[in-house]
Image (tube, rainbow, N blue to C red):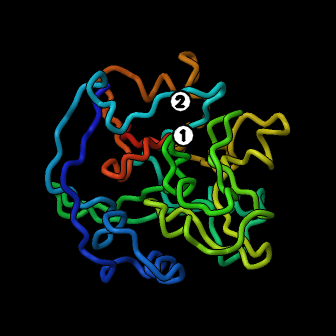
Amino acid sequence: MTALKFDNLKNEGIENLPDRQRRNFLKLGFAITGVFAGGTILAVTSSVRRSFASSGDFLAQYPYKPHYGMLIRQDRCIDCERCKQACAKTNHVPAYGYRTDILERVRPDAEGQQREFIPVLCNHCNLPQCVRVCPTRATYKDRRNGIVMMNPKKCIGCLTCQMACPYNARYFNEEKMAVDKCDFCWEARLDRGGKLTACAAACPAQARIFGDLSRDDDPVHRVVHQIGRTVWVLRPEAGTKPNVFYTRG
Protein backbone atom coordinates (compact mmCIF):
# COMPACT_ATOMS: atom_id res chain seq x y z
CA MET A 1 0.00 0.00 0.00
CA THR A 2 1.10 3.55 -0.69
CA ALA A 3 -0.06 6.46 1.45
CA LEU A 4 -0.09 10.14 0.67
CA LYS A 5 1.27 12.59 3.19
CA PHE A 6 -0.05 16.12 2.70
CA ASP A 7 2.67 18.51 3.88
CA ASN A 8 1.16 21.90 3.12
CA LEU A 9 -2.48 22.90 2.89
CA LYS A 10 -3.90 26.17 1.71
CA ASN A 11 -7.26 27.71 2.59
CA GLU A 12 -8.60 29.57 -0.43
CA GLY A 13 -11.98 30.40 1.05
CA ILE A 14 -15.47 29.20 0.12
CA GLU A 15 -16.49 31.84 -2.41
CA ASN A 16 -16.38 29.43 -5.35
CA LEU A 17 -18.18 26.53 -3.69
CA PRO A 18 -21.27 25.17 -5.46
CA ASP A 19 -24.45 26.63 -3.97
CA ARG A 20 -25.41 23.52 -2.02
CA GLN A 21 -22.05 23.21 -0.29
CA ARG A 22 -21.89 26.94 0.40
CA ARG A 23 -25.29 26.82 2.08
CA ASN A 24 -24.23 23.89 4.23
CA PHE A 25 -21.13 25.75 5.28
CA LEU A 26 -22.87 28.99 6.09
CA LYS A 27 -25.57 27.13 7.97
CA LEU A 28 -22.95 26.08 10.50
CA GLY A 29 -21.51 29.56 10.66
CA PHE A 30 -17.84 28.72 10.33
CA ALA A 31 -15.34 27.14 7.98
CA ILE A 32 -12.66 24.67 8.98
CA THR A 33 -9.38 25.76 7.40
CA GLY A 34 -8.20 23.34 4.74
CA VAL A 35 -11.33 21.19 4.50
CA PHE A 36 -12.78 23.26 1.68
CA ALA A 37 -10.55 25.18 -0.67
CA GLY A 38 -12.32 27.03 -3.43
CA GLY A 39 -14.62 24.10 -4.14
CA THR A 40 -11.96 21.50 -3.51
CA ILE A 41 -10.96 19.33 -0.61
CA LEU A 42 -7.51 19.91 0.80
CA ALA A 43 -5.75 22.19 -1.67
CA VAL A 44 -2.48 20.32 -1.92
CA THR A 45 0.61 22.42 -2.55
CA SER A 46 2.99 19.51 -2.07
CA SER A 47 2.60 15.81 -1.46
CA VAL A 48 5.00 12.96 -0.84
CA ARG A 49 4.33 9.28 -1.47
CA ARG A 50 5.19 7.13 1.49
CA SER A 51 5.24 3.41 2.17
CA PHE A 52 2.78 1.90 4.62
CA ALA A 53 5.52 1.14 7.13
CA SER A 54 6.44 4.81 7.46
CA SER A 55 2.94 6.27 7.42
CA GLY A 56 2.17 6.06 11.12
CA ASP A 57 1.71 9.83 11.22
CA PHE A 58 -1.87 9.47 10.01
CA LEU A 59 -2.68 5.77 9.74
CA ALA A 60 -4.56 4.72 12.85
CA GLN A 61 -3.86 1.61 14.86
CA TYR A 62 -6.77 -0.63 15.68
CA PRO A 63 -6.88 -1.24 19.45
CA TYR A 64 -10.61 -2.02 19.70
CA LYS A 65 -12.29 -5.34 18.93
CA PRO A 66 -14.18 -4.67 16.71
CA HIS A 67 -12.63 -1.45 15.43
CA TYR A 68 -15.03 -0.05 12.87
CA GLY A 69 -13.88 2.10 9.98
CA MET A 70 -14.70 3.04 6.42
CA LEU A 71 -12.88 3.30 3.11
CA ILE A 72 -14.35 5.62 0.49
CA ARG A 73 -13.53 4.96 -3.16
CA GLN A 74 -13.77 8.58 -4.13
CA ASP A 75 -13.91 8.17 -7.90
CA ARG A 76 -16.96 5.90 -7.65
CA CYS A 77 -19.23 8.50 -6.05
CA ILE A 78 -21.83 9.76 -8.56
CA ASP A 79 -23.56 12.26 -6.25
CA CYS A 80 -26.87 10.39 -6.33
CA GLU A 81 -27.32 11.23 -2.63
CA ARG A 82 -28.85 7.86 -1.82
CA CYS A 83 -26.38 7.59 1.04
CA LYS A 84 -27.66 10.84 2.53
CA GLN A 85 -31.27 9.80 2.10
CA ALA A 86 -30.71 6.39 3.68
CA CYS A 87 -28.78 7.95 6.56
CA ALA A 88 -31.47 10.53 7.26
CA LYS A 89 -34.25 7.94 7.18
CA THR A 90 -32.41 5.39 9.31
CA ASN A 91 -31.16 7.84 11.94
CA HIS A 92 -34.07 10.32 11.93
CA VAL A 93 -31.92 13.23 10.82
CA PRO A 94 -33.91 16.48 10.46
CA ALA A 95 -34.00 18.27 7.11
CA TYR A 96 -31.55 20.96 8.26
CA GLY A 97 -29.07 18.43 9.68
CA TYR A 98 -26.66 15.87 8.27
CA ARG A 99 -24.60 12.92 9.39
CA THR A 100 -22.96 12.50 6.02
CA ASP A 101 -22.59 14.83 3.07
CA ILE A 102 -21.15 14.91 -0.43
CA LEU A 103 -18.77 17.68 -1.38
CA GLU A 104 -17.85 18.67 -4.90
CA ARG A 105 -14.62 19.85 -6.42
CA VAL A 106 -13.30 20.55 -9.90
CA ARG A 107 -10.01 18.82 -10.65
CA PRO A 108 -7.90 19.90 -13.64
CA ASP A 109 -6.85 17.11 -15.98
CA ALA A 110 -5.49 16.68 -19.50
CA GLU A 111 -8.93 17.27 -21.02
CA GLY A 112 -9.72 20.38 -19.01
CA GLN A 113 -11.63 20.14 -15.75
CA GLN A 114 -13.28 17.13 -14.16
CA ARG A 115 -15.95 17.22 -11.46
CA GLU A 116 -15.30 14.99 -8.49
CA PHE A 117 -17.51 14.12 -5.53
CA ILE A 118 -16.19 13.44 -2.05
CA PRO A 119 -18.40 11.76 0.57
CA VAL A 120 -17.64 13.06 4.08
CA LEU A 121 -18.71 12.08 7.59
CA CYS A 122 -17.35 11.82 11.12
CA ASN A 123 -13.89 10.23 10.92
CA HIS A 124 -14.20 8.42 14.28
CA CYS A 125 -10.66 9.40 15.14
CA ASN A 126 -8.41 7.54 17.56
CA LEU A 127 -7.39 10.94 18.98
CA PRO A 128 -10.66 12.87 18.60
CA GLN A 129 -10.38 16.59 19.27
CA CYS A 130 -14.11 16.77 19.97
CA VAL A 131 -13.75 14.39 22.91
CA ARG A 132 -10.84 16.36 24.34
CA VAL A 133 -12.79 19.63 24.51
CA CYS A 134 -16.24 18.43 25.63
CA PRO A 135 -16.80 19.79 29.18
CA THR A 136 -19.48 17.22 30.09
CA ARG A 137 -18.10 14.12 28.35
CA ALA A 138 -21.20 14.01 26.20
CA THR A 139 -19.04 12.84 23.32
CA TYR A 140 -16.67 9.95 23.91
CA LYS A 141 -14.71 7.16 22.24
CA ASP A 142 -16.65 3.93 22.72
CA ARG A 143 -14.15 1.24 23.71
CA ARG A 144 -16.55 -1.49 22.57
CA ASN A 145 -16.18 -0.61 18.90
CA GLY A 146 -13.90 2.42 18.33
CA ILE A 147 -16.83 4.67 17.38
CA VAL A 148 -16.96 8.28 18.57
CA MET A 149 -20.39 8.51 20.19
CA MET A 150 -22.71 11.26 21.44
CA ASN A 151 -24.84 11.17 24.59
CA PRO A 152 -27.49 13.85 23.97
CA LYS A 153 -28.60 13.77 27.61
CA LYS A 154 -25.19 15.08 28.69
CA CYS A 155 -24.84 17.66 25.91
CA ILE A 156 -25.31 21.27 27.05
CA GLY A 157 -25.23 22.73 23.55
CA CYS A 158 -22.02 24.70 23.98
CA LEU A 159 -20.92 23.69 20.43
CA THR A 160 -17.30 23.37 21.54
CA CYS A 161 -17.02 19.93 19.95
CA GLN A 162 -18.51 21.22 16.72
CA MET A 163 -15.93 23.98 16.48
CA ALA A 164 -13.08 21.61 17.38
CA CYS A 165 -13.91 19.01 14.72
CA PRO A 166 -11.45 19.29 11.79
CA TYR A 167 -13.96 17.60 9.48
CA ASN A 168 -17.04 19.80 9.92
CA ALA A 169 -18.92 16.61 10.79
CA ARG A 170 -21.31 17.84 13.51
CA TYR A 171 -24.52 19.84 13.62
CA PHE A 172 -26.88 21.02 16.35
CA ASN A 173 -30.15 19.06 16.52
CA GLU A 174 -32.79 21.54 17.61
CA GLU A 175 -35.30 18.83 18.53
CA LYS A 176 -32.85 17.05 20.84
CA MET A 177 -31.19 20.32 21.88
CA ALA A 178 -27.88 18.55 21.45
CA VAL A 179 -25.11 18.12 18.92
CA ASP A 180 -25.57 15.16 16.59
CA LYS A 181 -23.22 13.28 14.25
CA CYS A 182 -22.57 9.99 12.49
CA ASP A 183 -22.27 6.98 14.78
CA PHE A 184 -21.73 4.46 11.96
CA CYS A 185 -25.40 3.53 12.50
CA TRP A 186 -24.47 1.88 15.80
CA GLU A 187 -27.80 2.48 17.52
CA ALA A 188 -29.96 2.01 14.43
CA ARG A 189 -28.28 -1.00 12.83
CA LEU A 190 -25.02 -2.44 14.20
CA ASP A 191 -26.16 -2.85 17.80
CA ARG A 192 -29.20 -4.69 16.46
CA GLY A 193 -27.21 -7.21 14.46
CA GLY A 194 -26.70 -5.23 11.26
CA LYS A 195 -23.44 -5.54 9.35
CA LEU A 196 -23.36 -2.33 7.30
CA THR A 197 -24.08 1.34 7.79
CA ALA A 198 -27.12 2.68 5.97
CA CYS A 199 -24.95 4.78 3.65
CA ALA A 200 -22.76 1.84 2.62
CA ALA A 201 -25.75 -0.42 2.04
CA ALA A 202 -27.55 2.18 -0.08
CA CYS A 203 -24.68 3.16 -2.39
CA PRO A 204 -25.35 1.79 -5.91
CA ALA A 205 -21.71 2.32 -6.92
CA GLN A 206 -20.23 0.60 -3.85
CA ALA A 207 -18.21 3.72 -3.13
CA ARG A 208 -18.17 3.00 0.62
CA ILE A 209 -16.60 -0.06 2.22
CA PHE A 210 -17.48 -0.45 5.91
CA GLY A 211 -16.17 -3.01 8.34
CA ASP A 212 -13.81 -4.03 11.10
CA LEU A 213 -10.32 -2.63 10.57
CA SER A 214 -8.88 -4.88 13.28
CA ARG A 215 -9.58 -8.04 11.27
CA ASP A 216 -7.11 -8.93 8.53
CA ASP A 217 -9.81 -10.81 6.62
CA ASP A 218 -12.33 -7.95 6.65
CA PRO A 219 -12.86 -6.27 3.25
CA VAL A 220 -12.16 -2.78 4.58
CA HIS A 221 -8.86 -3.89 6.15
CA ARG A 222 -7.80 -5.76 3.01
CA VAL A 223 -8.37 -2.79 0.71
CA VAL A 224 -6.82 -0.19 3.05
CA HIS A 225 -3.69 -2.33 3.41
CA GLN A 226 -3.54 -3.58 -0.17
CA ILE A 227 0.01 -3.46 -1.51
CA GLY A 228 0.42 -0.79 -4.16
CA ARG A 229 -2.84 1.00 -3.38
CA THR A 230 -2.72 4.73 -2.67
CA VAL A 231 -4.75 5.63 0.42
CA TRP A 232 -5.13 8.98 2.14
CA VAL A 233 -7.06 10.71 4.90
CA LEU A 234 -8.50 14.19 5.28
CA ARG A 235 -6.66 16.72 7.43
CA PRO A 236 -3.65 14.53 8.32
CA GLU A 237 -1.93 17.54 9.89
CA ALA A 238 -4.61 17.56 12.61
CA GLY A 239 -3.01 14.45 14.11
CA THR A 240 -6.35 12.84 14.97
CA LYS A 241 -5.61 9.43 13.40
CA PRO A 242 -8.95 9.05 11.60
CA ASN A 243 -10.60 5.75 10.75
CA VAL A 244 -12.14 6.94 7.48
CA PHE A 245 -9.80 6.48 4.52
CA TYR A 246 -9.97 7.50 0.87
CA THR A 247 -8.73 5.88 -2.32
CA ARG A 248 -9.49 5.61 -6.03
CA GLY A 249 -10.28 2.52 -8.02
Spot the residue most to the right.
192
Element carrying mark 1: strand
Residue under pointer 2: 220
- Along the line of sight, the residue nearer the viewer: 79 or 238: 238
The answer to whether residue 125 shows anywhere in this view is yes
* Quadrant the N terminus occupies: top left
Query: In the rendered structure, which amino acid carries the disc numbered 2?
Result: Val
Q: Does residue 31 appear left or right of residue 64 in this picture?
A: left
In this picture, is 228 found above or below 94?
above
Q: Which residue: 46% across, 43% down? A: 242
Q: Does residue 87 appear left or right of residue 167 in this picture?
A: right
Q: Residues within 10 Å of mark 2 (few under 14, many from 20)?
A: many
- Along the line of sight, the residue nearer the viewer: 130 or 210: 130
Q: Which residue: 43% across, 46% down? A: 240
The answer to whether residue 82 shows anywhere in this view is no
Return the disc, 2 or 1, that comes first in the chain's sequence.
Answer: 1
Question: In the rendered image, which quarter is residue 105 located in?
Answer: bottom left
Q: Which residue: 51% across, 40% down? A: 126
Q: Position of residue 204 (x, y in %)?
A: 60, 47
In this picture, is 160 found above or below 126?
below
Q: Residues within 10 Å of mark 1 (few under 14, many from 20)?
A: many
Residue under pointer 1: 70
Q: Are marks 2 and 1 in contact (CB under 8 Å)?
A: yes
